[in-house]
Structures are given as C-alpha cells and as structure tokens.
Amino acid sequence: IPKEFMRALPVIKKIENAGFLAYFVGGSVRDALLGVEIHDVDIATSAYPEEIKQIFPKTIDVGIEHGTVLVLCEEENYEITTFRTEGTYQDYRRPDEVTFVRTLEEDLRRRDFTINALALEQTGELVDNFEGEKDLENRVIRAVGVPKERFHEDALRMMRAFRFASQLDFEIEKETLLAIEENVFLLEKISVERILAEFVKMMMSKHWKRGLRYFLETNAFLYVPALSESSREALEQFLTLEENSLQSEGQMWALLLFMLEKESDEVRRFLKKWKESNQVIKETSNILQGLRHRKNQEWSALTLYSLSEEEASFVEELLGFFSLPYDVAKSREMHKQLPIHSKADLAVTGADLLQLTEMRQGKWLGKLLDELEKNVLLGEIDNKKQELLNFSQKKLEFLS
Ligand code: ATP
Ligand code: MG
C-alpha cells in the first residue's frame, strides 16, 4: 500500500469504527496501481454527509449536495463522498440530483471508466467489478457498462476519455471510441466550464498528442467553443509539432492560436467563448505576441519588455515545439538585464518633467514619458535623472 494511503488509513478506520463502510476510490487507486504519483486520496463511504460530520471535528462542505465533505485529518484533506448513484439524467448533462446508496457496487457502476471504477479496502484488497485492473494492464480506457448509455448520461465523459488518453498515454477501447464517434455532437450540451477544464488537462498532459488526435479524429472539436471545420487543418498541423510539455494555460492557448493563425485582436473574443479568465487572456496575448516576434528573430528589448520574465521564458520554450533552438536561461537573463522593467523604474517622474516647463499637465506628458521609456530601453539614454531631464528639456524647447 502506497504511503499516501497509509497516511489516510486512520480516516478509514474512524469511519469503520463508527459502523460504516469506507474505501479508497477513483483516480488515486488507479494511479497507485500504475505506480505513478498520487494527487488526492478520495474516499467513498456508506455514511451520509451528516454522519461524516459527526465523526470528524474538522470538515468543510465542499459539495454536500453531491454527498462530498472535505475532512481535515492528520494535516491532510480528504474528500469523502457518500456512495451514490446519479439518479435520472436530463439533457445529457450530469444530473442535478444524486441518490445516496448503501453499497459500493452501485457507486462503482456510475463511474465513467473501468480504470476509474476501482476501490481499495483498508486491508489492501482491490474491489474490481469491471475488470479495471486488466484494462490498466492493457492500457485502455473503457466505459463502465454500455458506452452509448454512459455518454448519453453525461457527454462530458467523452472529453474525459481524451483527457485520460493524454494523461496516461492509454488507448480508447474500440467500442467506447465508436460510441464517442457516434455521440460526439452531444458535447454541445455540456457547459463551457466543464469542457474547458478537461480540454486544458488534455493539452497540458505529457502525451497531449494522443488526446488531441482523438479530439480531432472523432470530430469533437466541432462541438466545443470557437473551433469549427475551418480549424481542422491547423489542428492537424498542431499534431506535427514536437510533443514537449506545456507549462501554463496561457502558453497552451498561445500555441493553439498561433497554429490557428489568429490575429491579436481575435484572441480575446476566442478565449471569452471558452470563458477564460482575464488573467489567462492577458497572458495568452502576451505570449502569442512574443512568439510571433521570437519565431523569426532574436529578442528585441522592446518585445522582451512587453512580457514578464516568465512569459518570455514560455515563449522561448515554445520554439522547441517547432524544433527550433532555444535557451530559457538566456531569455530570463536578458529580461533581467533590461534597463527598466516598467515606467515606474524611470529615474524621473511626471512631476519632475512638469517642473521643466510652464505648460500644464496634458497629453504631452504621457507622450514624453513614453519616449523616455523607449529610448532607455533601446539604450539611447542612460536611466539617470540628469540625462533624462536633459533629453526632456530639449524635447520641450522643441515643442514650445
Ligand atoms: P485526477 O487525477 O485528474 O483527479 P480522477 O480520476 O481523480 O483524476 P476526477 O475528475 O477527480 O478524476 O474524478 C474522481 C472520480 O470520480 C473518477 O475517478 C471517476 O470514478 C469519478 N468521476 C468523475 N467525473 C465523472 C463523470 N463525469 N462521470 C462518471 N464518473 C466520474
Ligand atoms: Mg481526482
């Protein structure tokens, strides 16, 4: 039993001592059997949320309507979810209502894929009702039960199949893949937020080409925001890039938008359709603009300055996807060496400049500061107060 489960054993024991059943379930069991790193240890139990809250002094209601309580125990957090089925499904989306059940078997049956429908008893014994262990060995993603029914219940599972293909470097089993091909249009019913989360995970996994290939071949891309038939060729080109790892959402989007040949002014509209945050949109725009420059030439001070050091390093890394030479350490160093990193670093302020002239504050002041900024970055003037004042004085004489 891996150490993450050993640490969590007291949690299981406490629930069992109170007279309920409790098992390790889901991704952590899968990852343990694969021998890869475990993120969160999820626990499934026959106890109802209210009963869990009576057993543990420190809990947080994270999704009590779905039967999930977060328990703080031994300085770790555990999501403890009551055995449940998902009752009736409407509109191909996850049901709003869940029904609690008292057996593990029923709970495992509602899970998406056989490799995710495994449970581990505290004794270390595996509960495997759907041959999940065999599928893990054969490295396949197979729907639990009848694939078509499972995708009709919740169409997001199709995106999840691609995501797990990327994360685990697994194949999607034939019947399951066929059901995806036939029902992929149902993705249209799924909320953008849920699609986004799976898409990002798919693209930011080590074997992203695998998921992306499925995403293309099944035509799933036609049913997600902002992509359409006209994106097909660009997505195919994407698959010819090096399979390096993407480090941030902004970096991922910038590469995608580069391949789609989106103009800078289209970035915002595109990512708003995906309901991306303003922060990610900003980062994406910066990286995309940096990539357009850097793909054809060395860094210039002005381009480097318009990015953060991290964004510049993301741009630099993206060159590797095109099999171009790159040097992240060097780009970081060049960024550090810029004479200034923002206007606030200039050795003069607006107030200093106002003292040079009778003129009142106006547009000229902003323009002059812009000019100082640019000249300092280009190395035309040193960022020293007197030099900046001399330069400004000359400009102002010229103006008046
Ligand atoms: P990760 O390592 O990315 O967290 P995970 O397998 O834990 O992977 P989660 O999205 O955290 O994935 O879901 C936890 C478990 O809940 C899954 O392993 C699966 O059993 C079940 N599950 C999650 N989403 C669905 C869904 N849409 N339909 C059916 N079962 C699901
Ligand atoms: Mg998880």
Image (cartoon, rainbow, N blue to C red):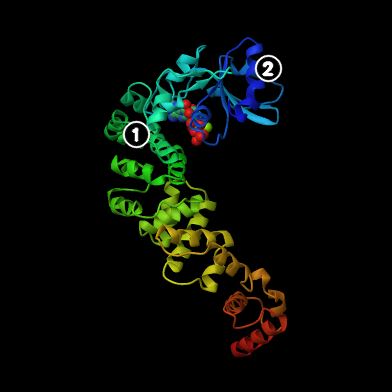
Residue 313 vs residue 150: left or right?
A: right
* Residue designated by label 1: 172
Q: Amino acid at mark 2?
A: Ile
Helix, strand, or loop for circle 1?
strand
As displayed, is residue 55 above or below residue 286?
A: above
Residue visible at 52% across and 27% down in the picture:
29
Rounded to the nearest angstrom, the CA distance separating label 2 from label 1 is: 41 Å
Circle 2 packing at 10 Å, graded few (<14), some (14-19), many (20+), is some
Dividing the picture into quarters, in which one does residue 168 lie? top left
On the rendered image, what quadrant is the N terminus found in?
top right
Upstream in sequence: badge 2 or badge 1 = 2
Residue 45 vs residue 157: left or right?
A: right
* Residue designated by label 2: 55
Task: List x then y, in percent, for residue 211.
Answer: 38, 42
Task: Judge by depth and name the residue closer to the eye, 237 or 88.
Answer: 237
Helix, strand, or loop for circle 2?
helix
Q: Which mark is residue 132?
A: none
Task: Judge by depth and name the residue closer to the eye, 72 or 25.
Answer: 25
Task: Judge by depth and name the residue closer to the eye, 189 or 22.
Answer: 22
Q: Amino acid at mark 1?
A: Ile
Q: Residue furthest top?
A: 19
